[in-house]
Amino acid sequence: MFQTYEAAEARQEGAARVAKLRQLMATARVDAVLVPRADEHQGEYVAPSAERLKWLTGFTGSAGLAVVARTTAALFVDGRYITQAPSQVDTRTFEVLQIPEAKLSEWLIEHLEAEATVGFDPWLHTAAVIEELAKILEPKGIKLKALATNPVDRAWGRARPAPPRGAVVPHPLKYAGKPAEQKIAELQAAMRKEGEDAVILTLPDSIAWLFNVRGCDVAHNPVALAFAIVPVSGKAELFIDPAKIGPEARAHLAPLARISEPAALDRRLMALKATSKRIRLDPASAASAFFRKLKGGKARVMRGPDPCLLPKARKNATEIKRARTAHKRDGAAVARFLAWLDREAMSGELDEIGCSRQLETMRSETQALKEISFDTISGTGPNGAIVHYRVTTPTNRKLEPGELYLVDSGAQYLDGTTDITRTVAIGKPTREMQERFTLVLKGHIGIATARFPKGTRGIDLDPFARRALWEAGLDFDHGTGHGVGAYLSVHEGPQSISKRGMTVLEPGMVISNEPGYYKEGAYGIRIENLVLVTEPEKVAGGDREVMAFETLTLAPIDRRLVLPELLSADELAWLNAYHARVLEAIGPELGPTDRAWLEVATAPIG
C-alpha cells in the first residue's frame, strides 16, 4: 500500500520541543524564528527529512508556517486546515491562526519589541516572501536574520531522517511526447531572446519535465530532488546525489547534462557570481539563499518566472492523448469502488481506512498504478468537513446511515496523473444535504460548461463555481481548481481557478474543477473532475474565438443527492450527457455486476 494511517505524534510533545528550540534561539541571538512547511525546493510535498513543521508542532498539513518567539508561538494555516490544525497541535503552546485574515507580519509587530531579530533559514523561504516581509518589518525596527544553520534541525538531532536517495529513471518519449533535447533547445532559444546567459532551476518537477526523467524522492510525486543550471548554449549541469543515477539514467542524461554532486552547487554559484553573466532566477519559487549567494558580484540576476512552468503546463498532443487513456482506466477503477461501496455501505462494517485501502487495491488491480497522487482523503460525517482530512487509526470512523462520505483520491500512472472527488450518500440523505450538494453541482457545471475568450484568467472564472452558493449565503474556503501535471505533481502551477488565479488559461492546460461546501461537525461535500482547456473555436454568430473545458474524469456523480428542481434545463442536460458518456466509456471495462450498477448510477434524471 502507498498510504499509511499512523497518527501523528502526540501534540503534547510540542511544548518540550519548543523549549529546546528557544534555547537554540538564545544561542543564535534571535528573538523569534520562522518554521515553514517547506524544503530547499519550495515544494508542496516534502521528504521526511524536511518535515520540520510537523516535528515541531504535530501539524501534518501540506501548507503552514510556525513562528516561535521567546514567550509565545503561533501556527498560521489557510482555510483548508483551520479545523484540522487545532486537533493536532498543542494549543497551549501554539495559537492557531487562519490566513489571509491573520498575517505573519502583523503578529511579529504585535509580539516583538523594536530592534528585535527574527531568524530564518534562507533555503526554506522564497526571495519574494522574505523581501516582502522585510519591507513591512523595517519601519518597525524589526530585522530579519538569515541563519547559517537551521535550529530546528539541531533540536531534531539524530532522530531526523536521512535525505532521500530514490532512483532516477528516464521518462519514455511515448509518454513525454517531446525529446528532452528539443525542450532544452527551445528553452535556450527563449533565453537568447531575453538576453539571458543562464537559468537556475530549483523546482524538481521543472527539472523532471525538462530532462524527461522521473524519481521517487518525495511521496506521491515522481520527482528527484535536484537543482540545475542551464546555460544559453551547451550542456546543462545537474546537481544531484550520484547515488540516484543508475546506468540507464546516466546514459539518458549524458547528452543533456553534466552530473555534479550537490556540494558543487555552492562553488558553481560563486563562480557565476564572479562573471558578468545574466542569470535568471524565479523569486516566487527559488530559495532566498540563491539571491543572497549571488548578491554583490558581477553577475546580474534577472528576476523572472521559472521558464519551464508554462511549457510544462501546456500539455502536448501525446500527453493529452495519454491523459485520456489514464482517466478512462482510473474512472473504471473508481466506478468499481463506488459499486462496491454501494453494496457494502449499509452493513455497518465499513470504515474510512478500509474504504481508502479498497480504492487503492482497485487501482492497483489495473496493473498500471505507479503511486497514488496524494494521501487519499477518506472522511465520513464530520470528518468529511475537514477539507484536507487525513484519516489515522485514532480518527477512523465507521460509515453510518444518514451520513455523507467524501473520498478525494488520485493515481500516478506513466500516462497521466488523476485527481477525483466524489461525495456519496450512505443511506437516506437529508433534504439539506441534497440542497447543498445540488448547489455545489451547479457550480461544478458552471465551470464545466464555461466558454471564455483568449486572455481569460482563473480568477475570472472562479465566481462561476460560487454563484449558486453565494446566493444561498454559502461558500467554500479553498480554490476551485489547481493545475495537474502529466505523471508529475498533482498540484501544478502556474494555472489555477481561484481568487488568486492570475495566470491566463491556455489550451492544453489541465485543471481541477472542485467546488465544495463544508458544514463543520456535520458533513463535507466536494465534486471534482479534471478538465482540459481546449483550442479556441469560432461560435456561430459570434465574432471572437472562445475556449472551453473538456472533462477528462469519468465516474458517476451520486444521483441520490441531486434535486432536479434546483437545476436548470441546461444543467440537467449536462449531467445526463456526462453520465451517458461515463457509461459508454467505462461500462465495457467493468464486469457484469459492476456494469449493472453503473447503468443505474448513470441513468438519466427526468
Image (cartoon, rainbow, N blue to C red):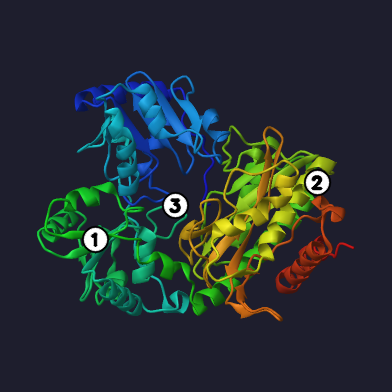
Mark 1 element type: helix
Q: Quadrant of the C terminus?
A: bottom right
Which x, y percent locates residue 549?
Answer: 63, 69
Q: Determine the residue located farthest toward the left in the rendered image.
A: 274
Is 463 located above or below residue 511 in the figure? above
The kind of residue on which mark 3 rests is Ala
What's the distance in space between the residues labelled 3 and 1, CA to CA?
A: 20 Å
Q: Earlier in the sequence, mark 3 or mark 1?
A: 3
Residue sitting at x 64%, y 44%: 476
Residue labelled with disc 3: 219
Residue at image position (37%, 44%) is: 38
Give the residue number, with chain letter if any, for mark 2.
435
Q: Quadrant of residue 256?
A: bottom left
Badge count: 3
* Residue denoted by label 1: 242
In the depicted structure, whether residue 578 falls above or below residue 139: below
The residue lying at 85 percent from left, 56 percent from top is 564
Frontmost of labels 2 and 1 is 2
